[in-house]
Image (spheres, rainbow, N blue to C red):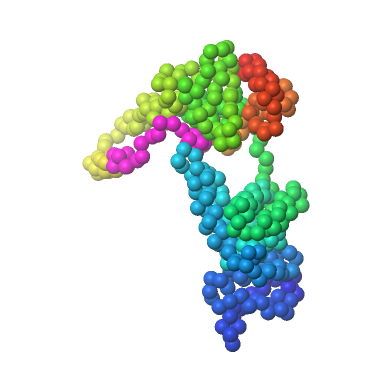
Amino acid sequence: MSRNRGHVPAYRLHESSGQARVIINREHIYLGKFGSDESHEAYARVIAELAANHAKLVTTSPTSGDGRPISVNQTILAYWDFAKSHYTKDGKPTLELENMRVSLRPLRRLYGTTPAGDFGPKKLKAVRQQMIEDGLCRRVINSRVGRIKRMFKWAVAEELVPPGVYHGLQAVTGLAFGRTKARETDPIKPIPDLYIAVVLPFVSPQVAAMIKLQRLTGMRAGELVVTRPCDIDMTSDVWVYEPSDHKNRWRGHRKEIPLGPEAQRILGPFLDRDPQSYCFSPREAQAWRLEHYPPHHGRVRKTKVYPCELKRRQKLKEARRRNRNRKRPKGERYNTGSYRRAIEYGLKKAKKAGFAVPHWHPHQLRHSRGTEVRRRYGIEAAQVALGHARADVTQIYAERNMEQARRIAKEMG
C-alpha cells in the first residue's frame, strides 16, 4: 500500500492550497477542499482501491460515453425510484428492497460523485474489498456485488450509462471458496428430530402443528404461514396444497405441495373455519395461552400481605393494563418472523426447564426433510419433494416429478 507495508496513508492538509491530500509512494494525491464530504469520499475511495488492487491506483476517464457525465449517486437515485415499485408484493415492499439498499451503500460511500460511465471492474473490486473489510461473509458479498451489477444493467437499459460499463462489470466473478480473505459461514444443517420433539411441549398447539407440518413436507416457512383450507385440494387420498403466495410466484410458476396421511392428521384440527381464513392464527394461540397459563398462577402465599405490597401490586396491575391496551393486537396469521420468534420462545422455555437443546430455526426443518428424502429416494426425489423450480424443465418432466412427490408423501406422511 505504501513504503511501510500494512501502513494506511493519512488524510492530510495541504496548507498553502487548503486542499486535502494523501501521500502514496511519494506521490501527492489531492482530494478536494480539506474537511469536505467530497474529500473524505475521495480519500475512502483511494484507500479502498489500494487495498483491492495491491497499491495501484485506479485511473478514470474524464468524461462518460455520452459526453454528459451522470454520477453514480444520480444513477442510484434513478434506480431506487424504479426499485420501490418493482420490488413489491401485494402493495408492500419485499425483503429484496432492503437487501438492495444495503448493497448499494458502500458503492455510494466510495464512488457517489464518480461519473457512472467511468465505473469499471477495478472500482467494483474496490467496493467488494470494502465489504470484506466490513466483515461480511463470502456469500453475502457475492450477492451484494450481484445486486450492484443488476443496477448497472438497468441503467444500461435506460440509456443512463454506456453499455460497456455493464459488460465490464460482468468480468468480475464471484469470490471463490478458500481463495479469499472473506469469512465463511457454516452451511445450514438439518436438525435432529430429538431437538424438535423437545421444543413441542413448550409452544402453542398452532406453532407445534406448524413445526411438525414443515418437518413432514419440507415447505418453506413463507408457504406454511399462509395455509388456508381453500388452497387445499382434498379430493384424493393425497391432498395437494397450492400456496397463494410462494417464492417463485412472480416467475409464473405454480407450487403444489402433496400432503400425506400424517400431514392430513396434523392439519385436520385447523380446517374447521372459513375457507378463506388462515389455519394458523396468533390470536388463537394467545387465547390458548391465556386459558392454560393464566396470569398470577404462582404458589399460594402463606405469610401476611403488608399494605405496601398491596399498593405495589395495584400499581403493577394498572401498568400492565395500560401496556396491554397500547399493544398492537395479534394478527390473523403468522409471518415468517413471528413464526421464527415463536420457536425461539419455545427454545428458551425448554432451556429454562433444564433441556440442553441447541438453537435452531425453521429453515433447518426444510433441510431435515430434504436430507431424509435424499437418503431414501435419491437426489432427484429430494429436489422434487422440496419443490425446487427449474426454468428449463419440460412439462412432462414436471408431471412425472409430481407423481413421485405424491408417492413420497403417501408413504412418509
- Identify whether 96 is placed above or below 206: below
* Magenta span: chief secondary structure: helix
The percent coordinates of residue 89 (x first, y second) are 49, 39
Instruction: Please tell me which residue lies in front, 338 or 75.
Output: 75
Can residue 68 be seen here? yes
Which is nearer the eye, 247 or 352? 247
Residue 160 position by quadrant: bottom right
Q: Where is residue 248 in the image (x, y as percent from the top left)?
A: 59, 35
Residue found at x 60% / y 66%: 69
- Compared across the picture, whether 154 is left or right of 352 comes to right
Compared with 218, 130 (above or below) is: below
Could you tell me residue 43's position as x and y percent? 62, 71
Q: Can residue 309 be seen in this view?
A: no
Q: Where is residue 257 in the image (x, y as percent from the top left)?
A: 58, 24
Between 291 and 236, the one lying in front of the other is 236
Q: Give the quarter of the figure containing the C terminus.
A: top right
Magenta stretch: residue 339 in it?
Answer: yes
Point out the residue furthest to the bottom here: 16
Is 18 left, or right, of 371 in this rendering? left
Say left or right for 283 vs 344.
left
Residue found 58% across the figure and 24% down from its top = 256
The segment highlighted magenta reads 320-343
**What residue is rendered at 55% in x and 78% in y?**
33
Q: Looking at the picture, does residue 149 appear above or below residue 90? A: below
Q: Is 170 rendered above or below residue 383?
A: below
